[in-house]
Image (cartoon, rainbow, N blue to C red):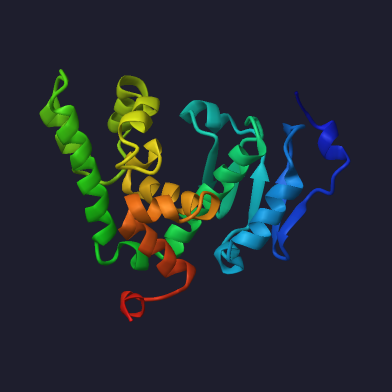
């Protein structure tokens, strides 16, 4: 059940940091807001929040139109409260925070193109494996996969034709999460989410360059620092 009465008895806004409020409009009444706040305060470096104005758990029409449950725009994170459990909402916030960090540390993350190379190699692995299956327009698909930027056509292929569930079952050794294949930016966002919520082991094994890039921004280190 979703309602506002649950929120009425809670302080609103909540504070993630002294300068970053969390506003809650509507949320499933089984959601543990205190857990979300404690996680964000204890697990995420405070400097990652510095460019944000606020975080909102609220319903946006854009979520339905784009078939998403979170977004980052105008220095604000918006997350749908209409999710099944506390972890889903927490994951959405951390994932979008990954895009905040991506913007701030863009040069560190992408400057040497190593992350892009790792990502495109994984997409090539995907394409090489499906060569055996009866797919039309393989050349067109190959061209789309060579572009690391987001493509609505490619997203439609993964969402409606191939299926993200199937992608997770068949390519769990290539991507830490099926949505990682969507674009280079989402490859980063999912990796950031995985690092902070699931831990480092899986990420180190499957996406070592991505893991190192996350550690570079977490510890504010250069590649030379990493090699010492």
The residue at 36%/47% (across/down) is 187
Report the front residue among 6 and 41. 41
Report the front residue among 60 and 222. 222
The residue at 40%/26% (across/down) is 165
- Image quarter of residue 110: bottom left
Q: Is residue 6 left or right of residue 73?
A: right
Q: Is residue 218 left or right of residue 226?
A: right
The residue at 59%/38% (across/down) is 88
- Image quarter of residue 104: bottom left
In the picture, the quarter occupied by the C terminus is bottom left
Expressed as whole percent of the image width and height from the top left, the position of residue 197 reads 54, 50
Q: Is residue 204 left or right of residue 111?
A: right
Q: Is residue 39 left or right of residue 216?
A: right
- Does residue 17 lie above or below 39 as drawn? below
In the picture, the quarter occupied by the N terminus is top right
Could you tell me how many numbered marks the image carries?
Answer: 0
Expressed as whole percent of the image width and height from the top left, the position of residue 199 reads 50, 53
**Residue furthest left in the image:** 139
Expressed as whole percent of the image width and height from the top left, the position of residue 145 reads 21, 39
Expressed as whole percent of the image width and height from the top left, the position of residue 167 reads 33, 30
The residue at 28%/29% (across/down) is 153
Report the front residue among 123 and 198. 198
């Amino acid at each position: 059940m979703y309602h506002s009465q649950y929120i009425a008895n809670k302080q609103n806004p909540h504070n993630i940091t002294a300068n970053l409020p969390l506003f809650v409009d509507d949320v499933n009444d089984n959601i543990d807001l205190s857990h979300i706040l404690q996680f964000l305060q204890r697990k995420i470096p405070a400097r990652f929040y510095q460019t944000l104005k606020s975080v909102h758990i609220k319903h946006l029409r854009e979520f339905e139109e784009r078939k998403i449950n979170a977004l980052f725009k105008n220095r604000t994170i918006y997350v749908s409260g209409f999710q099944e459990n506390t972890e889903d909402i927490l994951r959405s916030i951390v994932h979008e925070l990954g895009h905040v960090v991506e913007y701030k540390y863009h040069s560190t993350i992408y400057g040497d193109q190593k992350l892009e190379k790792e990502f495109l190699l994984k997409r090539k692995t995907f394409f090489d494996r499906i060569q055996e299956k009866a797919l039309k327009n393989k050349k067109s698909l190959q061209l789309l996969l060579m572009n690391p930027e987001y493509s609505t056509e490619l997203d439609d292929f993964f969402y409606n034709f191939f299926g993200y569930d199937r992608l997770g079952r068949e390519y769990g050794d290539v991507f830490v999460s099926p949505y990682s294949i969507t674009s280079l930016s989402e490859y980063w966002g999912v990796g950031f989410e995985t690092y902070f919520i699931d831990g480092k082991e899986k990420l180190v094994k499957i996406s070592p360059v991505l893991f190192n890039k996350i550690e570079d921004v977490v510890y504010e280190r250069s590649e030379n620092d990493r090699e010492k």
